[in-house]
Image (tube, rainbow, N blue to C red):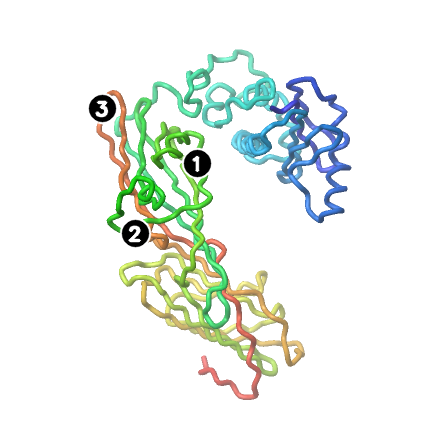
Amino acid sequence: MASSVFLLDLKGKPLIARDYRGDIPLTAIERFMPLLQEREDEEGTGLPVLTENGVTYLHLREKDVYLVALTRKNANAMTLLQFLHQLCKVFTEYFNALEEESIRDNFVIIYELLDEMMDYGIPQITEPKILQEYITQESHILEIMPRPPLAVTNAVSWRSEGISYRKNEVFLDVVESINMLVNPTGNVLSSDIRGAIKMKVYLTGMPELRLGLNDKVMFESTGRTAKGKAVEMEDIRFHQCVRLSKFETDRTISFIPPDGEFELMTYRLNTQLKPLILCECVVETHRGRIEFMVKAKAQFKHRSTANNVEIVVPVPGDADSPKFKSTVGSVKYVPEQSAFVWKMKQFQGGKEALLRAHFGLPSIRDEDPERRPPIGVKFEIPYFTTSGIQVRYLKIVEKSGYQALPWVRYITKNGDYQLRMPDPLTSGESRLPPI
């Protein structure tokens, strides 16, 4: 339970305050900013939960605004922090950006939202789509309050009654982002997979969906044997529509979905991966110039293709007079990033590509130049998953018994994907072929 919720500017001055329980004086917020600064001075970072004199301050910062919830109770901190995150999401949906100026321009509607989203300090309706059905932005003062949608009084607060479509469809995307750090010799220093299952639901009525994955824990708990590879997901996080009790007992993902687009779940796989796109780089420095040779290798299956590949190679900040030659794609010097960007619209699995780059160095440099930032790689591979996760089934049940079409798509893309640069070679004569 939250006793009150505040929106503050960067100096700690209240912009909006909503007291829900009356058990903490509103003047208690004056201690928030000094307390936060004390903790930052002591620990070097601001903690999201601060306590003083029996009052707990839970907070987050969005641009130039602090959102703070106060409580005296032994409240669930994660629930209140999640509520503040959802509050940010709702305000952003309404005002496009959550910042001090947008708050000052929308006092009336913000108080309306605070009253609907929390009752006596307990979170209530937090779905932006449901709130937008009866709290509109057409006027600051709502002269006629329309009847709340049935979703507000229904246990399924994220979906309204009476939704109807001529064609019933469900689109499901399994999107995996690869985080990876590779050293100059090609050895992987760290890697993991961050996955998300995103859905677009266009279904009539109040359907129930059941999703089955090749979940290793499910197979082990039921004593069944997986026909193919089974994956062990960690740090699973679900949308509120998923029945957690059902998942905990038999690992079944059962839910009544929101209408339209939403993120059903996220997960992590902490596993050792080989680079999908490996870049071998040789750098030579000479008096008045620097030369690069970059070889890119697509180390995934031949039948797959990476789209919109970008390889960002850092160069010295004072480099000039760029010259490029590549076997595939196009190359552009981006001086504001101190880098050149090699772009390939498509890069087929098993293929290699070569790039040569030459820059002038007008300033006198030391023999041992400072270590450069790593090479960054961007890509997207459709119909491909690194983890091997599979949608085994997606069942749609609705009392009217209509037929619905489920569509499933897999996408692998880069997350924080970096390859460290080698130390430059310094010699009188270039050992790289001329451009």
Whole-percent x and y of residue 111?
Answer: 61, 21
Kind of residue indicated by mark 1: Phe
Q: Which residue is mark 1?
A: 238
Give whichever of 397, 173 is nearer the camera: 397
- On screen, 341 above or below 325? above
Considering only order in the chain, which callout, 1 or 3, is on the residue closer to the N terminus? 1
Helix, strand or loop status at disc 1: strand
Q: Residues within 10 Å of mark 3 (few under 14, many from 20)?
A: few
Name the disc covering residue 401, or none. 3
Name the disc covering residue 229, or none. 2
The residue at the far bottom in this view is 429
Give whichever of 350, 92 is nearer the camera: 350
- On screen, 358 above or below 178? below
Considering only order in the chain, which callout, 1 or 2, is on the residue closer to the N terminus? 2
Kind of residue indicated by mark 3: Gly
Q: Residue at x 30, y 61 (%)?
A: 301
Label 3 and label 1: CA atoms lie apart by 27 Å
Q: Toward which corner of the image does residue 14 lie, by quadrant?
A: top right
Q: Residues within 10 Å of mark 2 (few under 14, many from 20)?
A: few
